Image (spheres, rainbow, N blue to C red):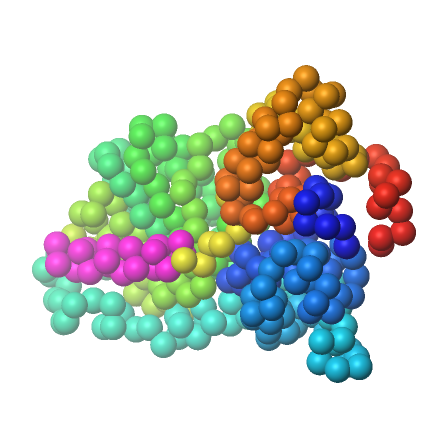
Amino acid sequence: MPPTDRVVLGPRAPSLSAWGLSADADLMFRCMLMYGSQTAGQLERGLGLSRQRVARGLDELLSVGAVDHRPGNGRRAVQWTPMKPSSVVPALRERRHASARTARRSTAIHEILPGTVPLDEGMRHLPSRELTRARLAELVGAVRHEHLAMQPERSYEAESARSAVPMDRTLLSRGVRMRVLGALPADAEDPLVAHGRQADDLRPDYRQAAETPVKLIVMDRRTAFLPVSPDDLDNGYLEITQESVVAALVALFQRQWDAGARQEQRPPRISLGERERDLLRLLAQGHTDASAAWAMRISRRTVSNTLRALMDRLGVENRFQLGLAVGALSLIEPPGTVPAEMEGVR
C-alpha cells in the first residue's frame, strides 16, 4: 500500500457503515478490496490506525462474514481477505431484516399504547387499506408542520406507493417537515422512483432503522395511524387522536429516529468546489503537493489547508483514508492511468 500521505482513489463499493459497522471497519474493507489480502500490521501502517482499532475492525468484519482469514507464521502474520460485496451486502441486509421481523413479532399494540384505551375515546377503526388511504388524502390538506412515518416493509405495496408520491410532493412543497424511518438502506435507490417520483422532487429526511417496531404515520402530532395487525395490513388501521396516545407514538418514533442517527457512521454526502476537485484529480494522478500547487497557481500552504479541510469534512485522518472516502463517494472520476510509482502495488 502507498504511504498515508498519498491520495489514491479507492474502489466504489457499498458502505458497510450503512449496515451498522464502524467507520474503521468500512475503511479496512475498502482497503482490502483495493489491495487484496492484508495482515493486521499492513492495515495499521497503510491506514494509519492503531493496533487496537485494527483489531476491533477486523473482529467486526469477521463477525458479519465480510472477511476470511488464513493462518500465517504467528498471529501478526494472519492474512485477512475481503469477501465480495455482492455476497456481503445481501447477508447484512437479511440480518437486519431478520432482526426487524423479530422485533415486529414481539411488539404488540398493548406494548406501544399507554394502557387500555376504548375505541370511542379518540380512536376509530378504518377497516381497510383503501379507507385508510382515502382518510390520509383527506387530512393532507390540513397538515402544516410535521409528518412522521415508520416503514418496516422491505418493498412497498404498489397502490400505497403511488398514493404516497403526490402526498409527499404536496406536503414538502408546502414546507412541511417530513421524516421517514425505513428498513431500506439510506444509500439505496429511492423505491418511489418506480411509482412516479421525479428526479427534481423534494425528498423527506430519511434514516434507516435497525428495528422498526411497527408501521406508523403521525400528522402534526395530532393524528396517528397504526395498523390493527402489523402482520396483515389488510385488517386496516386505527386512527388515533387522543393526545396521550399520539404523544406516546411520537416518543416511540423519536427514540427510533435517534437510534438511526447513532447507526449512521458513513462519510457525509458532500459536494466539491472546483479547486477541491482539481486538486484531488492532480494528487490522484501522482502529483506532489509542489507540482499540484504549481499547476493550479496556488501555494503549497493552500494545498495543505484545502486537504485538511476535506479530511475534516469527511471524518478521515490522513490522505490515504481521504482517497478511499473520495473513491467510495465517487466525488471525482478516477485517473485514466496508474502513476509510475504505483505500478505493481496491486
Relative height, residue 309 to residue 257 (above, below): above
Judge left or right: residue 303 versus residue 10: left
- Is residue 190 in view? no
In percent of width and height, residue 49 lies at: 60, 60
Q: Residue at x 76, y 75 (%)?
A: 77
Please determine whether, in this image, residue 99 is positioned above or below residue 126. Answer: below
Label count reads 0
Quarter of the figure with residue 81:
bottom right
Left or right for 342, reference 102: right
Region of the chain picked out in magenta, as a range: 242-261
Q: Residue 305, image x and y in percent?
A: 55, 32
Q: Position of residue 324 (x, y in %)?
A: 66, 48
Dividing the picture into quadrants, the one containing residue 289 is top right
The furthest residue to the top: 297
Which residue is located at x 38 percent, y 37 percent? 167
Q: Nearer the viewer, residue 226 or 7?
A: 7
Residue 93 at what x, y percent from top left?
57, 64
Q: The C terminus lies in which quarter of the figure?
A: bottom right
- Is residue 254 highlighted in magenta? yes
Q: Residue at x 30, y 35 (%)?
A: 176
Q: Is residue 248 above or below residue 301?
A: below
Q: Residue furthest left?
A: 121
Asked if the stretch drawn in magenta spans residue 150, the answer is no
Q: Residue at x 69, y 20 (%)?
A: 296
- Left or right of residue 195, residue 216 in this image: left
**Main secondary structure found in the magenta portion:** helix
Task: Specify the quadrant that holds the N terminus.
Answer: bottom right
- Taking the image as drawn, is residue 168 in sight? yes
